C-alpha cells in the first residue's frame, strides 16, 4: 500500500520546475524579463536562461552562427542570409534539428506546420523577428 502511495506521489511531481512559478507576476507596463528554467542535462539539474535577441543584427548573427556551427553544413564560407539550406547540404530533418536548437536556446515553440516553410536562413531570421515583435506587443509568447 505504501509503495502505491509513493508511486502516485512520484508521478504527480513535475519533470521541470519553472522559475516563473516561484516569482510574483510583473506589473503591467514593464517588459517581461527572460525567466530562468531548471532542466536536467546529463543527470544534473541546471538553471538556464533563454537568449534574448532584440536587435536585427543579433538575430541575423545568431541564425548564421547556428547554421555555420551545425555539423552537417557544407560550404560554410558561402553562407549568407539568402542561402537556401539545400545549397549547404541540409535537408528537412536538419531543418527540424535547427528548429529544435532555436526552441531550446530562445524558449520558443515552433509548430510542425511552420517547419516546411523554413527553407532559407532569412526565413529563420524573419520567424524570430515576428515572435519577438509579438512578445513585445502582447507581453506574452505566442502559443506556437
Image (cartoon, rainbow, N blue to C red):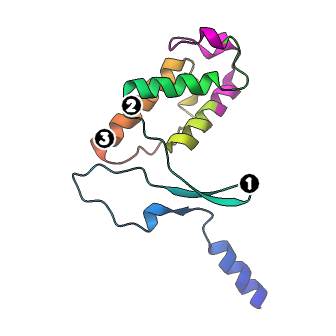
Residue shown at the point (62%, 16%) measured from the top left: 85
Range shown magenta? 76-97
| Residue picked out by circle 3 | 136
| Residue picked out by circle 1 | 42
Give the x, y percent position of residue 46. 61, 58
Residue shown at the point (57%, 19%) measured from the top left: 119
Which of disc 2 and disc 3 is earlier in sequence?
Answer: 2
Q: Distance between the residues labelled 1 and 2?
A: 33 Å
Which of disc 3 and disc 1 is earlier in sequence?
Answer: 1
| Residue picked out by circle 2 | 130
**Image check: 109 left or right of 25?**
right
Q: Do tag 3 and tag 2 residues touch (Cβ < 8 Å)? A: no
Give the x, y percent position of residue 4. 75, 84
Quadrant of residue 77 within the rendered picture: top right
Q: What element carries label 1?
A: loop
Give the tally of numbered discs.
Answer: 3
Q: Quadrant of the N terminus?
A: bottom right
Quadrant of residue 112 within the rendered picture: top right
Amino acid at each position: 500500500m505504501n509503495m502505491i502511495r509513493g508511486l502516485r506521489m512520484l508521478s504527480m511531481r513535475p519533470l521541470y520546475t519553472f522559475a516563473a512559478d516561484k516569482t510574483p507576476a510583473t506589473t503591467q507596463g514593464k517588459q517581461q524579463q527572460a525567466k530562468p528554467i531548471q532542466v536536467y542535462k546529463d543527470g544534473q539539474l541546471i538553471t538556464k536562461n533563454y537568449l534574448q535577441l532584440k536587435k536585427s543584427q543579433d538575430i541575423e548573427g545568431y541564425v548564421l552562427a547556428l547554421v555555420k556551427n551545425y555539423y552537417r553544413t557544407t560550404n560554410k564560407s558561402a553562407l549568407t542570409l539568402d542561402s537556401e539550406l539545400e545549397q549547404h547540404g541540409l535537408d528537412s530533418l536538419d531543418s527540424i534539428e535547427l528548429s529544435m536548437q532555436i526552441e531550446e536556446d530562445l524558449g520558443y515553440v515552433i509548430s510542425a506546420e511552420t517547419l516546411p516553410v523554413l527553407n532559407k536562413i532569412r526565413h529563420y531570421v524573419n520567424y524570430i523577428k515576428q515572435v519577438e515583435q509579438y512578445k513585445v506587443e502582447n507581453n506574452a509568447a505566442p502559443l506556437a
